[in-house]
Image: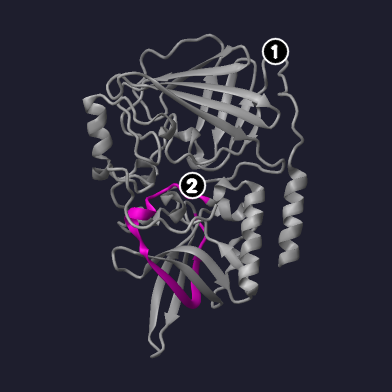
C-alpha cells in the first residue's frame, strides 16, 4: 500500500511538472516489446548504465530453485528521469530492485521497464518507450 | 517520501512564471526567447486526416512497416519533426536571426530574418535550408532543400525530397507559443496541409540538458530495432499488440 500511495504521488508530481520528458519517442515499443507479456522481476542490481538515449539496468534474478538469470531492462531517458529528481545513484549495485515491465519479443532476457521499485519502497518512474506506443 | 514529493511539487509550482502579455524585443517584434516545454506530438496529421495523398505519397505511407524509424538510429528528426519531438527547446532571438536550440539530439537551427534568400548551392539536408521573416508578431520560417530520409512524426507520416515546410511561430502570451506547420510536398500530397498547437513555457528553473543519442543506443547496437512507426500503428487504423497502460 505504501508503494501504491507513493506511486500515485509520483504521478501527481509528474503531471504538475507537465513532464513531456517522461516520454521516450526514440524507438518503437510495440515492435520491439510485447505489450501482451507483462513481467515482474525481482533481483539485485549488477550494473547501472545511466546514458542516453535510455538508461539500462542490469539485474540478477534468482529463481526458486536457486538458478540465477541475468536480465537487462530498459528505462527512460536520463534527462526525463533527472528532471523528476532521479540519478544513477538512485540505484545501488547489489541492491534490491523490482521491475514491472514487458518482455522483449525476441525471447532474450530483455525487458522494457514501466516502473522500478527499490528496496526502500521508492518507485522510480521508468519513462519507458512504452509511452511512445500510445 | 511523500513529504519530499510534496515539497518538490510546491517548489515546481513556485517556479512557474505568472502569465502576461508577450514580451517585446528592442526592435519592436514580439520576443520569442525562452525555454519552451514542447511536447511529443505522436501523430501530427491527426486533426486533418485523411491526408490528401498522391499515389506516391500513399505508397510511402503504406510501406512504413518496411523501414526502421530513422530517429531510432539517431538520425536527426529533421524539420518539422524536430518541433514535435520530446524534450524542451530554447529560442534565442536577436535583431537579425532567431536561434532554435533543441535538447533532443542536440539539434540547432540559425534562422536569419535579415531578408536573405535560400542558399542556391547547398546539398539537400535533414534540417533543410530555413529562412525567416516577420509577419507582424509572427515569425514565419520557410524551409526547403530536404532529403527524403526523415519522417514527419512518430506515426510514420512521410515526405519526399520535394518537401517545403512553412512554420508560423507566435508568442500569444508570456507563457505560451502558438505553433503551426504547413506541409507542402507536391510529390506526396495533392495540396498543402496545416496543423498547429500551443507550446507552454518551461518551469523557470529549467535549462537544456544533453541528449547524446549515440552514447548508448543499445537497441541499435544489439540489433533489437524493428521496422515500423514508433506508435505501432498499422495502416488499417489499428495498432499492434496491446498498448501498455498509460502513464502520462
What's the CA distance linking mark 1 and mark 2?
36 Å
Residue A40 horizontal/vertical position (percent):
45, 73
Residue sitting at 40 percent across and 85 percent down?
A63
Quarter of the figure with residue B20: top right
**Residue in the foreground of this view, choosing between B72 and B40:** B40
Q: Is residue B25 left or right of residue B46?
A: right
Check the residue under mark 1 and report the chain it is in.
B
> For the magenta stretch, what is the residue range?
A23-51
Structural crowding at the residue carrying mark 2, measured as other residues with C-alpha within 10 Å and reported as few (<14), some (14–19) or many (≥20): some
Residue identifier under label 1: B27
Indicate the position of residue B182 as horizontal and vertical percent values.
44, 22
Residue at image coords 51%, 74%: A98
Tag 2 residue: B212
Q: Are marks 1 and 2 in contact (CB under 8 Å)?
A: no
Q: On screen, A63 above or below A19?
A: below
Mark nearer the N terminus (1 vs 2): 1
Up the image or down, A86 lies above or below A67; here it is: above
Q: Nearer the viewer, residue B11 or B119?
A: B11
Q: In front here: B211 or A42? A: A42
Question: Mark 1 falls on what kind of element?
Answer: loop
Chain letter of mark 2 equals B
Q: Is residue A50 magenta?
A: yes
> SS of the residue at dot 2?
loop
Quarter containing the N terminus of chain A: bottom right
Whole-percent x and y of residue B105? 48, 41
Question: How many residues crowd mark 1 within 10 Å: few (<14), some (14–19), many (20+)?
Answer: few
Task: Count every numbered label the image shows and give the total.
Answer: 2
Inspect the magenta stretch and tell me whether residue A20 lies in it.
no
Report whether B210 appears left or right of A72: right
Amino acid at each position: 500500500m505504501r508503494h501504491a500511495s507513493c506511486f500515485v504521488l509520483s504521478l501527481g508530481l509528474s503531471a504538475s511538472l507537465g513532464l513531456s520528458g517522461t516520454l521516450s519517442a526514440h524507438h518503437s515499443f510495440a515492435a520491439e516489446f510485447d505489450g501482451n507479456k507483462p513481467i515482474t522481476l525481482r533481483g539485485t542490481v549488477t550494473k547501472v548504465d545511466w546514458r542516453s538515449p535510455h538508461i539500462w539496468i542490469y539485474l540478477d534474478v534468482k529463481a526458486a530453485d536457486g538458478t540465477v538469470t541475468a536480465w537487462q531492462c530498459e528505462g527512460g531517458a536520463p534527462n526525463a528521469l533527472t528532471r523528476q529528481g532521479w540519478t544513477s545513484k538512485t540505484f545501488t549495485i547489489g541492491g534490491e530492485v523490482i521491475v514491472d515491465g514487458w518482455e522483449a519479443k525476441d525471447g532474450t532476457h530483455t525487458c522494457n521497464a514501466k516502473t522500478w521499485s527499490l528496496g526502500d519502497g521508492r518507485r522510480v518512474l521508468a519513462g519507458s518507450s512504452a509511452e511512445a506506443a500510445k | 517520501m511523500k513529504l519530499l514529493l510534496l515539497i518538490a511539487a510546491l517548489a515546481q509550482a513556485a517556479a512557474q512564471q505568472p502569465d502576461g502579455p508577450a514580451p517585446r524585443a528592442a526592435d519592436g517584434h514580439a520576443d520569442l526567447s525562452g525555454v519552451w516545454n514542447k511536447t511529443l506530438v505522436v501523430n501530427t496529421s491527426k486533426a486533418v486526416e485523411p491526408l490528401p495523398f498522391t499515389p506516391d505519397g500513399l505508397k510511402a505511407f503504406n510501406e512504413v512497416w518496411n523501414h526502421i524509424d530513422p530517429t531510432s538510429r539517431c538520425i536527426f528528426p529533421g524539420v518539422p519533426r524536430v518541433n514535435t519531438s520530446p524534450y524542451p527547446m530554447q529560442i534565442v532571438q536577436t535583431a537579425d536571426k532567431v536561434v532554435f536550440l533543441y535538447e533532443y539530439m542536440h539539434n540547432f537551427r540559425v534562422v536569419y530574418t535579415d531578408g536573405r534568400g535560400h542558399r542556391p548551392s547547398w546539398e539537400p539536408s535533414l534540417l533543410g535550408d530555413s529562412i525567416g521573416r516577420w509577419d507582424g508578431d509572427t515569425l514565419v520560417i520557410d524551409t526547403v532543400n530536404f532529403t527524403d530520409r526523415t519522417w514527419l512524426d512518430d506515426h510514420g507520416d512521410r515526405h519526399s525530397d520535394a518537401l517545403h515546410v512553412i512554420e508560423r511561430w507566435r508568442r500569444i502570451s508570456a507563457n505560451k507559443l502558438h505553433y503551426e506547420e504547413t506541409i507542402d510536398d507536391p510529390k506526396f500530397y495533392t495540396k498543402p496541409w496545416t496543423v498547429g498547437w500551443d507550446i507552454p513555457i518551461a518551469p523557470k528553473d529549467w535549462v537544456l540538458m544533453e541528449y547524446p543519442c549515440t552514447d548508448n543506443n543499445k537497441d541499435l547496437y544489439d540489433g533489437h530495432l524493428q521496422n515500423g512507426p514508433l506508435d505501432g500503428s498499422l495502416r488499417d487504423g489499428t495498432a499492434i499488440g496491446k498498448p501498455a497502460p498509460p502513464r502520462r
